[in-house]
Image (cartoon, rainbow, N blue to C red):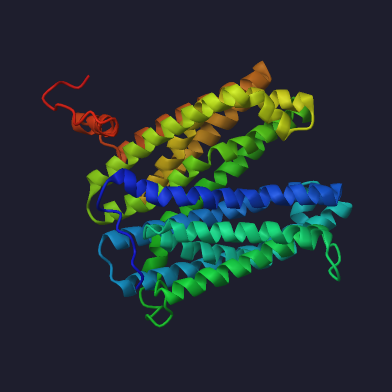
Amino acid sequence: MSADRSLTDGPVGRALYSVSAPMTVGILGVLSVGLADAFFLGRAGTDELAAIGFVFPVIATLTSLSIGLSAGTSAVIAQAIGGGATGADQQRLTVHAMMLAAALSGVAAVLFFALARWLFMALGAGGAVLDAVLGYVGYWCIGFPFMVTGMALNARFRAAGRSGVAATVMSFQALLNVALDPLFIFGAGPLPPLGADGAGIATTLARLVAFAGILTYGMRRDVIRFDCAPLRGLWPSVRRIVRIGAPAALSNAIGPFGMALVTGAIATIGDTAVAGFGAATRVQGLMMVPMLALSSGIAPVVGQAWGAGRQARAQEAVRLTFLWCLGLGLGVAVLLTALAGPIAMVMTADAGAARYAAAYLRVVSWAFFCYGILITANSAMNARDRALWSMGVSMLRIFVLYVPMVWAGVLTMGYGGVLAAAVLANALGAWGALIAVRAVGLLATDRAALRAPAEWVLRRLGRGPIDRARPLG
């Protein structure tokens, strides 16, 4: 069995950094694929670019569902590692997770392919655009099970504190996808230009190669074996993974669905506002990468600590992650407030859209740290086997707060109401997340716990520990 990393010993901050930092690179790689597809297809033709516009929200939702399943896998295996599970038990859990991922993603791919024409016609695609959509979707569906099954194996590496492996696979797949895009979209030598079909082929080939690579690596390192009585305990493993993964999947899918409803509200202002809002949210996605990496990193730290019965360590990890989100978020807000105008002009070709984008970045960026707290809290609760709580927090933010407030804001104050709604939804959502993590035992509020973050800061400043005899404050 390969040497896995214990996340239950040593400084909590070091453990969080070691698993979060590599994921920053991996997540940036994944985001680059969508940008590359849009860039190259935009130069292939307007029909191809429109096709990817129709496809992206649907595949983003399916991918979000698979990320939830991966979260369930990571939580179950991290708790097993923290609880001292044998190597054979870990191998069986990994095989069970991959079997479940392959089965569910295979069914989803078949259903998506069968319903694609009806679905995209209902969304408004037709003619050459619909043909391009269906060409892309056909190849995308072939590669989907390989992506999801590979994510399950990747989750095992993250649960063991080896996020560098997961990040390497994500980055390699993204680089290969971006390299293959122009070859298949525009053609080369005897290969004819394939347009949107070519983008789908590039994505599928990259997924196949990445899956083959991670599977080979896992088998050589004894992380996965198929001669470990793979059917033993299958049903209990599946139930544990689904108990966490199903609510986590729904929680992840809520975001893209809610954004569609929000975009509908902004469309009442006009196409220019929609363009500016879309550009701003793409920038927001890039700026949130470090906090997304933290949400990936905190799960194995909390999962291993909780599995080992070290609840205080899990609580310290949550407090420290929230502090990092605060610092990162405020730093991003200062940067975007100063550079919102130039960034908006780079992201849009229209001056009107740039004004909408810049306004969003200047105002809403001050609540980015709140969203960071929310997503890291949700990840920690998933690792604690409290996925229903994290799903509840996500539903609260989107359906109780964000969508109703955006519609009320746009009808009463126009675009300014949209910005106010985004800030309030993030702030109140973070407040709800704080209440939830405290309720499930991941956030202590005693005086000693409140001193811990201040002690950590003072140690980094070289000022030594706090005098515990002095009253707090």
Which residue sits at x=63%, y=57%? 175
Q: Residue furthest right?
A: 127
Outermost residue on the front side: it is 462
* In-image side of 196 versus 57 (left or right): right
Residue 28 image offset from top left, x and y in percent: 57, 48
Q: Is residue 125 visible?
A: no
Q: Quadrant of residue 280?
A: top right
Query: In this picture, is 410 found above or below 38?
Result: above
Camera-side residue: 410 or 304?
304
- Residue drawn at 45 percent across, 67 percent down: 97
Q: Where residue 310 appears, x then y in whole percent?
A: 22, 50
Q: Quadrant of the C terminus?
A: top left
One can see residue 150 in this view = yes
Q: How many marks?
A: 0
Q: Quick check: 289 left or right of 10?
A: right
Q: Nearest the camera: 427 or 470? A: 470
In the image as oriented, which residue stretches furthest toward the left? Answer: 469
Q: Quadrant of residue 88?
A: bottom left
Q: Position of residue 221 (x, y in %)?
A: 41, 73
Q: Residue at x 59, y 39 (%)?
A: 285
Quadrant of image for the N terminus: bottom left
Picture layout, residue 265 above or below residue 182: above
Seen in the image, is 308 located left or right of residue 395? Answer: left
Image x and y of residue 10, in percent: 25, 50
Which residue is pictured at 77% across the width and 51% down the height? 40
- In the picture as drawn, the residue positioned furthest to the top comes out as 413
